[in-house]
Image (spheres, rainbow, N blue to C red):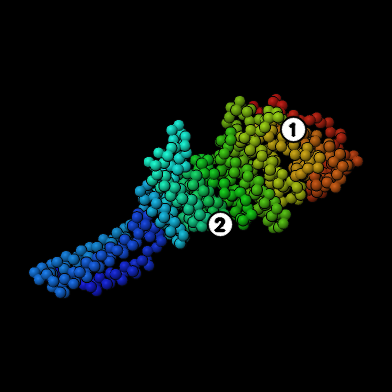
Amino acid sequence: MSFVGITVGNAVAALAFTFAIQQFLRPIHLFRLRSQGLPINVFYIAIFIAAGFVFAGNFVRSFEILPSSNHLFASILEYVGAALFIVSYLGVAFIATIRPRFSRRNAIPFTQAAFSLMSKAKEEDYVRFFHDIVHNITEIFELAKFNEQYRFAGIGRERPSAFFDFIHRHTIERSAYAGDLLSMLSDSRFCKAIITHDSTAVVQLLAKISHGRLHSSKGQRMIQELARQSILLDSSMLEREVGYHGFSHIGLFLESMFGDSFIVRSYKPLNKISAFYDVDISHRFVERLSAAVQQVWKTGAGEIWHPQSVYDVARLLDSLSSTIRSLEEKDTTQWRLSAPIPRILQTIVEASNKEILELTTEERRSLYKPDEETSAHEHIASLTAEIIFDYFCNISNGFLGFEDKQWVGALDVFGEVFPSGDTQPAGLDPIQQHLALRIIGKVRDNMIGYYPAITRLLLAVIGPYGSRNGKSNSAFQLLEDAFYFELRRFSALAIESPEKVSDYLPPNVRFQKEQSVLVHRYAFNSGIRETNLNKLNLGGVDFYDKSRFVS
């Protein structure tokens, strides 16, 4: 009986192939090996042991150490070595190509392997690694949450005892590693690669988080950075959904990131976009941001009281409108930047009014500010009014009336809140009351020389007194009456600080101090209209009058 052995040359060739194969192992393959507690060194050791069996078999065969059965024993050694070769190569191939499982058992090696990968991997490895994360996101979040809830883990939800720390010491350590893993995933370079190359994986991630109601403060930073990159990058899926592309009718990413109520409420995706000093503000960037803001507000407006989901919107829009205004003043070619802002504000007003109208009469009345002494509560009506008021203030100083780049936008926003015409109902809704109180308060500040000069904007959008023929006691008419009632003190300002007069008037309006007359010049020199402030028979408007509240 003869046996076919494995030669020394075969073993040497296998060793050479072993050293060559590591050139084909990408960082993602090494991560998958290490995450399961199998470093590549284990593979090398197995190969060397296999080579040792082959060498031993050939040694026995060549020197006939065992005369009676040397060929059989040598073949057994060689076949054992061959089996080790096969098992090693197949094992590496299998483990390196399947998605690893994250669990409490391997949380530490998994995180350590992830750190090694993220420190030196390329973008395609990032994408494949992110798919592994999505596959295990439930387990990662659940383990990371243990330490986040640690302070409530004791009896009576008090801080746990030292004994609790002792018996859960391993879980505490592994939970810390899971939290560190989520923190690593918020790296801007990593998130940029994911948004650029595979936004659909982000959609899958968000779907799993929303469906499982998973929450982690460490994971929050990852979601916010992914949202930030989707708005910043011209190559993102959000750009394709917002732009004139085939994806614009789907909006899957927009809906998943900014339109899911759980994601918006728990993760506040717009939180990391607040300052724009390090952002290249382009028209497309503003369009993407506009779409995200509108979607977030539509989703979060249902939180009438203490609307945590949309607080970031107020801060963001205030910063954005002031930044764009500054850019437009420096560079007249940037006029397109401000175009999306009025659409955002109109959407905010529409969405807020829709939610308010669904309330009962008693609930709606609770949104009004009852008197001057009572502080305005935090609710959707006051927050909406604050956003609109901040926009008016940001564009007021230096407003050029009908020659201003934001003239049409200012008219649209003002008309959205205070529509004029005979068909408008009498009284004020909650948003109108809160905004009117803020506007008139600022007008009073203007009359004693303070800024921003909101009168400059109001004279342009309201126009001469009575020019709109608004319905008596409509919100527009009440605001117009209150505004011109306060303007009667403009003569005193003109006498005390004549150098400031032009600051409070748009270029198409001049003030005749002797007669206390405002002269409006219409666009294209189509006529003028005078308003004699002394002859206006106006009384103060009480915006706290409950009879004016719309039921």
Q: Where residue 47 appears, x then y in whole percent?
A: 28, 65
Q: Label 2: which residue?
A: 234
Q: 505 left or right of 204?
A: right
* Residue at (36, 50) in percent of width and height: 106
Asked if residue 160 is positioned above or below residue 64 in the image, the reply reads above
Q: Is residue 250 visible?
A: no
The circle on residue 478 is: 1
Looking at the rendered structure, the kind of residue marked 1 is: Leu
Q: Residue at x 55, y 51 (%)?
A: 228
Q: Is residue 16 above or below residue 500?
A: below
Give x and y (percent) for residue 180. Answer: 46, 50
Callout 1: SS:
helix
Residue 113 in percent (x, y) is at 40, 56
- Against 258, residue 1 (above or below) is below
Of residues 108 and 522, the one drawn nearer to the viewer in this rendering: 108
Looking at the rendering, in which quadrant would you find the C terminus? top right
Residue 544: name its quadrant.
top right
Q: Residue at x 37, y 47 (%)?
A: 104
At which x and y percent is residue 548?
70, 27
User: Decide: marks 2, 1 in contact (CB < 8 A)?
Assistant: no
Residue 476: image quadrant is top right
Q: Earlier in the sequence, mark 2 or mark 1?
A: 2
Name the amino acid type tagged 2: Asp
Query: Can residue 190 be seen here?
Result: yes
